[in-house]
Image (cartoon, helix red, strand yellow):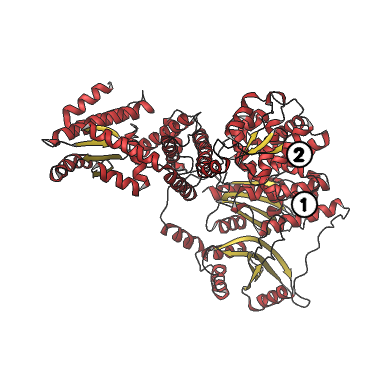
Amino acid sequence: MTSTDVRTDAEDSGPSGYAAARLRLLQEEVRPGPPRRAALAELTDDWLAGLFGAGVGELRGASLVAVGGYGRGELSPRSDLDLLLLHDGSDDKAVAALADRIWYPVWDLGLALDHSVRTPAEARKTAAEDLKVQLGLLDARHLAGDLGLTAGLRTAVLADWRNQAPKRLPELQELCAERGERQGELQYLLEPDLKEARGGLRDATALRAVAASWLADAPREGLADARRRLLDVRDALHLTTGRATDRLALQEQDQVAADLGLLDADTLLRQVYEAARVISYASDVTWREVGRVLRSRAVRPRLRAMLGGGKPVAERSPLAEGVVEQDGEVVLARAARPERDPVLPLRAAAAAAQAGLPLSLHAVRRLAATARPLPTPWPAEAREQLVTLLGSGRPTVDVWEALEAEGLITRLLPDWERVRCRPQRNAVHIWTVDRHLIETAVRASALTRRVHRPDLLLVAALLHDIGKGWPGDHSVAGEIIAKDVAARIGFDREDVAVLATLVRHHLLLVDTATRRDLEDPATVRSVAEAVGSPGTLELLHALTESDALATGPAAWSSWRASLVSDLVQRVAALFAGDVPEEPEPAAPTAEQERLAVEAFRTGGPVLSLRAQTEAPAEDNDDTDEKTDPEPLGVELLIAVPDQPGVLPAVAGVLAMHRLTVRTAELRALDLPDGVEGSVLLLDWRVAAEYGSLPQAARLRADLVRALEGSLDIAGRLAERDAAYPRRRGVVAPPPRVTVAAAASRHATVIEVRAQDAPGLLHRIGQALEDARVRVRSAHVSTLGANAVDAFYVTGRDGAPLPGDDAASVARKLEETLRG
């Protein structure tokens, strides 16, 4: 069916005909995107014009005007109809009747309507008072009635906008910035708002408004395509959900991708991020130009008066060879020859980042168009300029994005293309892969005084996740890529080997510190063998901290920092020749011994709660801020006569009281001389999920009931879980349980990775209890929604499990968690 057929059907059948024609149009698969949006707008134009014509009667001096997105002739399936009934004020009663004849049929069809009835003077007055109204009127388009009335308003509104631009544009910029702060950056969000987030459709509309002011204009290349891509995604989202939503929720992404003919949700997100990046960069450049023009207009009259007329010459300050500052931007010197100087792009970028200034759009485009490629390997100056750029702190981000917008980064580092705009479907990560790498370099720049080779630290920060664009373990793939990149940019063989080791093992320290027994010499030796040297250990420590800080708030804490630092000290001592001895069982403290004796005497559990805090962090050379002690949680000591079921009972009671377990150790204590028997001692650190900690007496009372079997922990947890409404969301991957080979000589290490949930540790403990194994210690980590736990277990005889038995326990535990 052609668009002419659809329009005729709508005109013949009135509102019901329009509804049927609209439905057929939206169900067509042959012309999605701009053609469908234009056809839907045209169909709606004809229907509304018919409503206007049927209701206008003898009224003259009235017109129906589309504004906003509808005014631009772009209607998504669930878009609002933004309409203005314009009149000359001669017959208010007839205008009110006409409005009813138009608005009510729209409402009757369930269409969202944003409407107003105004005279041209009222419209201009409202626009002067409300910036959003004025922006909508900039796209005013005549639908029906008095064309002269509409044309006169359009001319007046555009004239007002251009006359008031020096005042209104800063207001618009502030509005965009506030919205970006609230909604976040579209190019990094896992569930982005396509319209309101920074780099979304609102910002694209703001750029049109700036262009309409004739004061400045946005970079045009790619902008129309980026905007079209976001509109296409919004169309598919509207059709998938049947709702007028702009938020691309996780559960909708696969279907939206399929509707757009894309491979998967990751491909969809990458396209969204690329479009958002184009719009964000164009916004940055445009608002910078607006500021420059407004400053120039404010200063020029005074300069002319001082100089006696004539155009003032812009001041240029040298920054580096071929690079100067002019009017708050970094530009190329007049004598610069990018076609003869292949290092110039990196030199200009490093100079801009060091000065904390933006690279001008003209300079970046000239470099992209004319600069020669660097030879392989790079000359020393190029490598030094890259390190300088990476070590410049926060300004590095904007300069890097300017280079990336014009394709210079992938020209320098071809492997960057695979990580560019790549989403990370992990709640812990707050950035895409490429931005995370730059953010890691920014964090590493603050730690360069801690290492002997800051250049290797910064380049490792840039490359540590470069393997995420390839299948398989990204650390293994990244090691291969890092070797190639490091050799290409001119590092010698020894430095290449160090960088490859850092990339291969960038997760080693935090994984080991949070999931392994640091008292076990096998743990320390395994790390030392992987790292290889004290210098590499020093770099890896700084890289670990930079990586975690750049990941997000859930990835780093004083607790993790202290564990990693402890591990690093032990490995450094081993490198220095201090070979760790097999650990002797630690002697109980006086408090532990007291609790153990009391537990044996009473025959029931005895416990104590004690708050822990960490000392303030060391002063940072780059900041004057002082940090307060960070709470590490509460130490929970429990002593209970040796008996089965202790671990699941304690874990279940803590879950019932909404206590999160951060670390957990369990060991048997022999009683003092003259007392026969054994007591289990649990030394755990816990924290309240929210609210205050429960009283120790309440914990003990519930623990007594749990050990007696009179407290149905599983039932209570299930009842509480059922009381909360279930929300739709991404389906979590299934749990995985593995046996860590050769992790300890004294126990079998079973690793559990699962979706974190109340009672998870209780279920694991019960499953291990059912498997008739003893838990020697537990190392519990929660990263966002993911629990990553390690359990040191032995058989009832206290020895590690045979291989087949260990595999059987892991398999049964995984089956339990999957069920």
Label 2 residue SS: helix
Hey, which quadrant is residue 346 in on the image?
A: top right
Q: Looking at the rendering, which quadrant does residue 103 occupy?
A: top left
Residue 774 seen anywhere in this rendered image of the structure:
no
Q: Where, by quadrant of the figure, is residue 565 drawn?
A: bottom right
Q: Nearer the viewer, residue 88 or 773?
A: 88
Which residue bears the numbered disc 1? 450
In this picture, residue 649 sits left or right of residue 495: left
Q: Is residue 38 left or right of residue 749?
A: left
Residue 291 position within the rendered picture, expressed as x and y whole percent measured from the top left: 52, 43
The answer, for residue 588, to whether it is visible in the render is yes
Farthest-out residue, right: 577
Image: 46 above or below 694: above
Residue 420 in picture, x, y percent from top left: 59, 34
Q: Is residue 42 left or right of residue 439?
A: left
Query: As shown in the figure, which amino acid type bears the numbered disc 2?
Result: Leu
Give residue 745's position: percent from left, percent from top. 78, 52
Give coordinates of residue 359: x percent, y percent.
61, 37
- Which residue is rendered at x = 27% and y = 31% of the image? 23
| Label disc, if present, on residue 499 of the rendered structure | 2
Tell which tag, 1 or 2, sits nearer the viewer. 1
Cα–Cα span, label 1 and label 2: 17 Å
Assess disc 1: are there few (<14), some (14-19) or many (≥20) residues with their C-alpha within 10 Å of its C-alpha. Answer: few
